[in-house]
Every structure is written in C-alpha cells, then in structure tokens.
Image (cartoon, grey):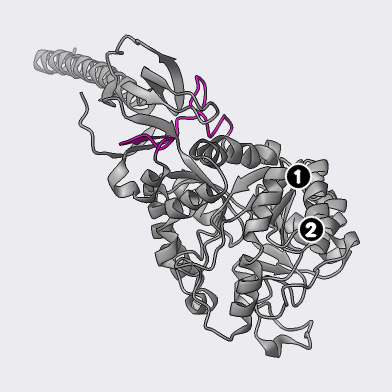
Amino acid sequence: MPNRCEHVISEKALHYIKFNQMKRLIYLSCMLFLYGLLGRAQETAEKNTILIINATVFDGQNEKMQEGMSILVEGNKIAKIAKTINIPQTAQVVNAQGKVLMPGLIDAHAHPMFAGISQQAGLTSQDGYLNLVAAKTAEKFLMQGFTSLREASGNSISLKCAIDQGLYLGPRIYPTGPMISQTSGHADYRPSTSIPYDPNATLSYIERSGHALIADGVPEIIKGVRSVLRMGATQVKLGAGGGVASIYDPLDVTQYTFEELKAAVDVAETWNTYVMVHAYTPKAIQTSLRAGVKSIEHGQLMDEETAKMIADKGAWLCLQPFLDDEDAIPFPEGTPQRTKQLAMVAGTENAYRLAKKHNIKTAFGTDVLFDAELAAKQGKQLAKLQRWYTPFEVLKMATFNNAQLLKFCGPRDPYPGELGVIKEGALADMILVDGNPLQNLDLIIDPTKNFVLIMKDGKIYKNTIQFK
C-alpha cells in the first residue's frame, strides 16, 4: 500500500497543479481580452477618424466653393461631406474656422532624386547619399503642400517604397525610374571618354544606380522599357529631343527614330501604361505623337501645327512656366547650357498661348533639377501660371487635372482611388489654407505661413490649429 504521507503529498500536488493551471487559464484569458482591446484600439487608431468642421471647400473641379462644410475622414479616404455630421466617438475634430480646404497639390513633372543637390554632386556622389538627400527633399515637397508627384526620371523607386512604408515623410510618388536615352541623348551623362563604346566595359555609375538607361536600336529599346517596368515604374520616359542641362545634345536635335519610339510605346502598352517624352521642338513632338506617345514633357518650342496635333491626338502636354527670371537655373553666361536655356524660355509665352487656343490637356510640373533653393519654391512656380490662367484654372490644373494624368498609368497605379479632388470616397489628401487662394493665389507661395493643415492619405502631417 502506498504510504499515506505520500498519498497526501500527491493529492496536495494535484490540487496545486490544478490551481496553477486555472491561474494560467485566467491569465491567458485576461491577456487575450486585453490583446483584443488593444487590437480594436489599434484598428481604431489605424482607421484614423478625423472630422473637419466649418470649412469652406474648394473641391478641385468647381469654381464655386461650399461654405460651412464638415468633412469626415475615415482611414485614408473621405467618408462623408455634409453641412452637419454627427461626431464619431473616436474622431479627432479640427475646426477649420471658415478657412479654405482644398485638395493636395500635385507636381506632374518632378525630380526628387536630383532637385535638392547640385549637378556636380548629383553626377559624382554615391547613390546612398543621393537617396538620403532625396528623402529630405521629399519631406520638403510634402510640407509645401504637394501630396503627390509624378517623378520624371531619377529612380525614386526606393524612395517611394520608404515613404509608403512610413520610414520617411514625402508625397505619393508615381515613379518613372531611369530615363531611357540614346547615345548622346538627354540622359547621356557619361564622360566623353566613354566613346568609342567598349562592349566589355562596365556601365557608368549613374546607369548602374538606375538613374539613366542608354539604349540604341529597337531591340535595346524593347529590353530597356521592359527593364524599367520590371523595376516598378508606373510609366516610361524617353528623351526624344535635345535638352538644356544635358551635355552632348543641341536643342534642335531629334532623338530616337519613329521605329524606336514606336517600339517603346508598344511595350508600354503591353503593360497597360504609357510613354512620356522629353521634347521641345515640333519635329521631336510630332514624331513622338505619330509613334503613340501620350504625354509630351515641356514643348516650349512647338508651333501651331504641333499644338493642333497634340490636341487632335488627345495627348497631354506637361508644360512648365520657364522664364528668364530670378528663378531660372543659373547656368554660367556663354556656356552651351545658358544658350540653350535662353532659346527654350523664349518659347514659353507662345507655348501657353497655343495650349489655351487649342484646348490641349495641360498639366503643371516644376522640373526642378540641381537647385535646392528653387526646389523650395514649388508654390512660387505654380503661382507664375497666373500670367496665363485665372487662379481657379491654375488650382484645377495642379489638383484635378494633374490627377487625371497620374491615373493615366491604369493598372500600374500604386495608389488606387481618386486624387486631386475633395469628394466622398476620394483619397484624403487635403490642405487647409489661411485665406482664399481663388481670390489670392499668391497665398501658395508661402506654405509655411498659409498652409495651416496638410493631410496625406488621411494622416495629418502639419496642423497649426488645435484639435477641438
């Protein structure tokens, strides 16, 4: 028979084990309950409910504004717009105090990788440094009220991913990646000693970093376009004519043949996206349009026939207000770049006149390169459009119209949802302006002072108005 003492000990041990099991079960149940609460709290936080009240709304499309409106943001979208909205229990409430709420601005031709750095540094620095500088530049873009941009070459794909993951602040980026250029084209920044070409030589550093891609002939073009799309580009860019800052190409030069441009367009269309081209002159633009190009970048030297062709083809013209003023890139007098710059800006006035006359689908872009000071003046560049357009037309171009161009990439769009407009169901990218920009567009020149709230994707990145 077992020793009674042993039996008693065993019984006590059994009770002890059961008691501890029960404690563990209670503990686990409590923890699961708490985790559930935390999960719901996290879900609520992620939903990020914000109610903006007492706002005067410019929706991006209509000149007539709506006063005394409330806008409910749930998650990253505008859930409801009405005169009165019941305040959700979890909502943060912002009293706009009658200020103007408008869509976030869009830069349809930007170079975040090279806007905040000198040309020499851009061409000689390691890519890690370029990305670090670009991250700071992107944050400044966002704080200037530009919540989205279309990158027009410079391989911002890594930067875009870091911003989307919340590692850095910045706008939504529709990346183009490397501009595809012919030998001696607009993106050929190789040293002069690279010619004659040695097929056994390694690529230049700027090519290895994905900021430019040199391709000659239809087979290389086809492979180049597919390579860019594989990298994650939402659209493809080619240099179709001479450039100002580039080294080897006079302004009048037409780059790529019809067959080469057509090959690029055909490949892009197999990916359900489009080709944009750098082009100033009538011949470069017309060749591109005949090849099926959907977006002409710049176009300052176009003539009447070319403008009509752009309109007839239904293509976009992304035009910049380049003038020989205090904001012009300071190329040294007497240099080829300065000579080309003067010839190009001389056509700006006529280009805008033709764009308006032929009702061309016109987008706004800054195209700032190698100038950190100018990169801090996006709003000033936009305000220059008052020379040709009303404040309403300018703001509609930089919001709703530009958004239509961004969305031209179809299923390659990394940000499904409507941009450039304040309406129910649209993505919540908005700016609250202390003043009425439809009456005084110069307010956008000083975003630090006049943009009191900046929201992107339903998150507030700047707010100088206290929550109610």
| Real-space Cα separation, disc 2 to disc 1, in angstroms | 11 Å
Residue furthest toward the bottom? 193
Q: Which residue is mark 2?
A: 285
- The residue lying furthest to the right in this view is 259
Q: Magenta stretch: dominant SS?
A: loop
Q: Which residue is depicted at the point 69% across and 90% down?
A: 193
Residue 377 in view, yes or no: yes
- x%, y% of residue 99? 32, 29
Residue 56 part of the magenta-drawn span: no
- First-in-chain label (2 vs 1): 2
Span highlighted in magenta in the image: 416-439
Work out whether residue 50 can be spotted. Answer: no
Q: Residue at x 29, y 20 (%)?
A: 91
Residue labelled with disc 1: 315
Q: Is residue 414 above or below residue 240?
A: above
Task: Kindly give the residue lying farthest to the left in the view shown.
Answer: 5
Residue 427 % position (x, y): 50, 29
**Is residue 244 shown above or below 87?**
below
